[in-house]
Amino acid sequence: MQMGVMGKARSVAAMGGRILNEAVSFVAFCVLDLVDFLLCFVFKAVDLWVEAELRPCYCSSAKEAITSSGKILVSEQGGESKIVSLLSSTKLQLEDISDTLYSRPSLVSEVSRLTINELKRFKLEDPVLQSKRGTNSRCSTFTVNTTIVEMLQGKIARHLTHPIPRWSDCDCKLCTSWISSSSSPHNDNTNAKATLFLKSQCPTTDEAGEDVVFIHGFISSSLFWSETVFPNLSKSCYRLFAVDLLGFGRSPKPNSSLYTLREHLEMIERSVLEAHKVKSFHIVAHSLGCILALALAVKHPQSVKSLTLLAPPFYPVPKGETQATQYVMRKVAPRRVWPPMAFGASLACWYEHITRVICFLICKNHRLWEFLAKLITRNRVRTFLLEGFFCHTHNAAWHTLHNIICGTAGKIGSYLDAVRENRDCKVTIFHGKNDEVIPVECSYEVQKRIPRAQVRVIDNKDHITIVVGRQKAFARELEEIWSTTTTTNHN
C-alpha cells in the first residue's frame, strides 16, 4: 500500500516537473525569440557601420520557383517580387540546403505571418506572380531565403577573393592561418585550391600500412584525435589522417560558404584521398562526423573497409512526416530549458543572432578564455579541447549544424541502407551510456538499419569521455577492429 502511494507521488511529481518545464520554457523562448529579432537590427546597424555594407541574414523566408530556363522567382514576405538568374549547377545546390536555416517557427515569425496574411487581404495579387503562374505551371518550388540565392548567384563572391574575417570573428594568427597559406597573387580565387588542415602520422617502417581517416564532431578539431588516439596507436602499421573540417580549427573558413554536405565531402576528398593517394581506408568518426563518414562510405563503397561511429546522430523520421528537417531539428533542439544540454542545443539551432553574440564573446576572445582556464585550473585542463571548441566562425557553425544535422534528415536513412548492402564494410558503433548530447537510442536505431553493426555502450562515459580519458583502451579496440577487417577481407 505504502509503495503504491509512493509510486503515485513520484508520478505526480514527475508530471508537475514536466508541466513546470514546459511553462517556463514557453516563456523563456518567447523572450529569446524577441531578443533574437531585435539583435537582427543591431547586427545590421553594426555591420553597416564597421564593414560599410549590409550583410544578409535568414530572418525572412522567400518562395523560389525555379523554371526550366534557369530563372528564379523570388517572392519576399512583404509581397515584393523579383526575378534572378542562376546557373544550372546552382539549382542543384539548393537541394543541399536545409530549410531549417530560414524556417524556424517562433512567436515573432507567427505574428509576422499573421500580420502579412491580414495585409494581403487588402492587396491585389502580385501581377508578376500571376503571370509566372500562368506561363510556368510545371516549375518546381522551393522555400528558400534570398540570402542563399544571393550567395549561390555569386553576388557576394568577392568575399572569396578577399577572405577578411568579419569584425565579430577572431583575427588571430591561429584562426586566420589558412588565409596566408592559401593566398596567391596569381590566383584569381583564393580558395580554389584550398585544402583542409591535416594532422597525419605515418608508419615508421617502409611496409605498407592501413590508411585511416578520422573525422571530428561539431565545434571540435583534429586535436580530438591527434592528442588522444594517435599517440596510443602502433606507429609501424597505420597511416593516420585527422582533418579539421571546413570552417573549424585551422581549416579555411570562407564567409560565403554554405557549408553543405557536398562542400564538406569535396574538401575531405581533395585534402586527404586525392592529396595522399588514399585508395582503401578505414573511417573513425565522432558525432556530426558520423554523417560525413556514412556519406563517404556511400560515395566510395569499394574503398571504405570499416566504419567506426561514435555517438551517431541518427533520428529516424516517422512515416508520414512531411518535414523531415523540421522533425530532426525539434528532436535535437526541443526548445526546453531543462535539461541544460537541451537548452544549449535549442539556443544553437533556433537563434541565428543570439549564437552570433555567443561566438563573438567566446570565439573572438578565445585567447582570454584559454588563459583564464589555465590560470584557474593551474594548467591541468585539457587545452586541446578548448582550442577545438573556440576555433570556428559563427557562419561555419550555423550552416554546418543546419545543413548537416538537419539537412540530411531525408538522406541518412538511404545512406544506412546502402552501407547495409555493402557486406565488405565492417560497422562498429560506440556510445557513452551517460551521453546527454545524443541519446544511446540513436546508436540502436542505426543497428536496426544495419543489423550486422556491433553496438558497444560504455558505462559511465559521455559524449566526450567516450574517447578522452579512455584513449588507450579505445586505441586497442580500434586496432582490433582494423585487424579483424583485414583478416576477413583476405579470407
Image (cartoon, rainbow, N blue to C red):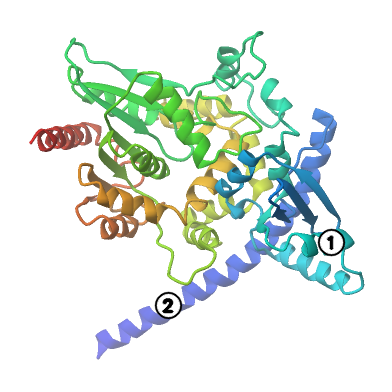
The residue identified by callout 2 is: 13
Q: Residue at x 36, y 18 (%)?
A: 276
Examine the rendering and report whether any part of residue 375 can be seen: yes
Q: Is residue 122 left or right of residue 285?
A: right
Instruction: Tell whether 460 sits left or right of 82.
Output: left
Residue 380 visible somewhere in the drawing:
no
Please state the total of marks drawn on the protein image.
2
Residue sticking out furthest to the left: 491
Query: Mark 1 packing: few (<14 Cα in 10 Å), some, or many (20+)?
Result: few
Distance between mark 1 and mark 2 Cα atoms = 60 Å
Image height of 336 relative to 3, above or below: above
Q: Nearer the viewer, residue 60 or 433?
A: 60
For the N terminus, which image quadrant?
bottom left
N-terminal-most mark, 1 or 2: 2
Q: Nearer the viewer, residue 241 or 63?
A: 63
- Badge 2 amino acid: Ala
Q: In terms of secondary structure, where does tag 2 sit?
A: helix
Would you say the residues marked 1 and 2 are in contact, meaning their CB atoms lie under 8 Å apart? Answer: no
Q: Secondary structure at mark 1?
A: helix
Residue 110, picture quadrant: bottom right
Residue under numbered circle 1: 131
Quarter that holds the C terminus: top left
Mark 2 surroundings within 10 Å by alpha-carbon count, few (fewer than 14), some (14 through 19), many (20 or more): few
Q: Amino acid at mark 1?
A: Ser
